[in-house]
Amino acid sequence: LQFFQAFMDEWKAIGGETRKDQEEVFKELGTILRDKGLINSLIPAADRLEEMIRTTYPEIAIAPIDKVTKKLFAGELTDQLQPLKMENRKSKRPVTTFTSINFSAPQLQGLKGLTYYDAGVYSAICTLYNRGGNEYMTNQMIYQAMTGKEDAYLTQKHSADISNSVTKFMYGGVYIDATQEIEKHHIAGSAIYDTNLLHAERMKHNLNGTITECIHIIKPPVLLEYAGSKDQIANVPIMALATPVNKSRDTITLQNYLLDRVHGMRGGDKQHDIAYSTIYSTVWGKESTSPKGPQSGYSRVKKSRLREAALKMLAHWTTEKGGALIKGYKEYKRGTTIAGVTIIL
């Protein structure tokens, strides 16, 4: 009633009773009421629905698979400029790209370096942005794209892990000098990238009718842009990521490592053997492969479970539902001990 009284008072004050230009009257009235703090918006309720952003779940998952990206998430890059060979095997003229990372921002204190878990988060962001057309995305959306399940349940632990990964991307920098690649292979992309891994802002927005915390992608992810300029982006059905295993941090790390290896093999990598010791060190660190010490005792059961998870993932990728990424796989031995698995394309 107080608002209605104020509305009528202001309406009369600007001659609303006698003026014929009622559309202009209400525009003036809206401005007056807003300036006096009586209303928050001049946009009619029907038009405010346009502020709501509809998100899209993609059917195709993508991932940058260039050498820089591989080295980055394998933890092989540092703040020291590193030369990477980019020439073809038969080429006589060397082609070198120089790259480094910068993780010195104070926001990154306490966070470990990049891992294959982070690779899964980054690929999910690229997928949602490029294949789903989503500039705004939540941790829930990222987790759904990581796991290939539209109804995936996001735990607080996974939400925190994803947030940490996003922080690494927002404040971690990468430097790529691809000048020689540009000249040799006539690539249309930039010669030098010196930027954050992800230009994004954290905010609240109306997504699908709910005000929620999300990230807003301001420009295309740099690794997606660089890999795309060389046509080095893997495309798989999103269901290929819906492997039949419990999605813990360990299994997500494992899945992204195995996918990276499979993508490499499909791209021409002749090494089709994956040693279980390499899988252990990728997921848990190099100390996990030590035959002595605290790692050797507790990890015996965990190693067995990790191997089982790896085989379930590989079996999924032999099916049509899993994208038929491989034809098959078989374990191999070193002496009498099962040492790893061979991928059959």
Image (spheres, rainbow, N blue to C red):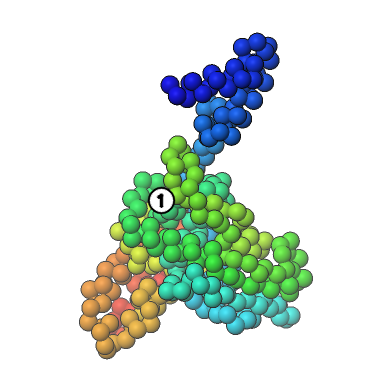
Q: Nearer the viewer, residue 201 or 8?
A: 8
Q: Where is residue 223 in the image (x, y as percent from the top left)?
A: 59, 64
Picture quadrant of residue 188: bottom right
Element type at marker 1? helix
Number of numbered discs on residues: 1
Q: Is residue 121 visible?
A: yes
Q: Position of residue 117 (x, y in %)?
A: 42, 66
Q: Which residue is drawn at 32% across and 86% down?
A: 290
Quadrant where the N terminus lies?
top left
Disc 1 residue type (three-letter): Gln
Q: Where is residue 11 in the image (x, y as percent from the top left)?
A: 59, 19
Q: Which residue is drawn at 54% across and 51% down?
A: 216
Vertically, is 220 above or below 110? above
Q: Which of 126 and 310 is in front in this view?
A: 126
Vertically, is 322 above or below 329? above
Q: What residue is pinned by disc 1?
A: 140
Q: Which residue lies furthest to the bottom in this view?
A: 292
Vertically, is 169 above or below 151? below
In the image, taking residue 243 as reference, residue 336 lies left or right, namely: left
Q: Where is residue 39 in the image (x, y as percent from the top left)?
A: 52, 31
Picture quadrant of residue 269: bottom right
Q: Residue at x 45, y 24 (%)?
A: 2
Q: Residue at x 44, y 46 (%)?
A: 212
In the image, taking residue 219 as reference, residue 49 lies left or right, namely: left
Q: Is residue 314 visible?
A: no
Q: How crowded is mark 1: few (under 14 residues within 10 Å), some or many (20 or more)?
A: some
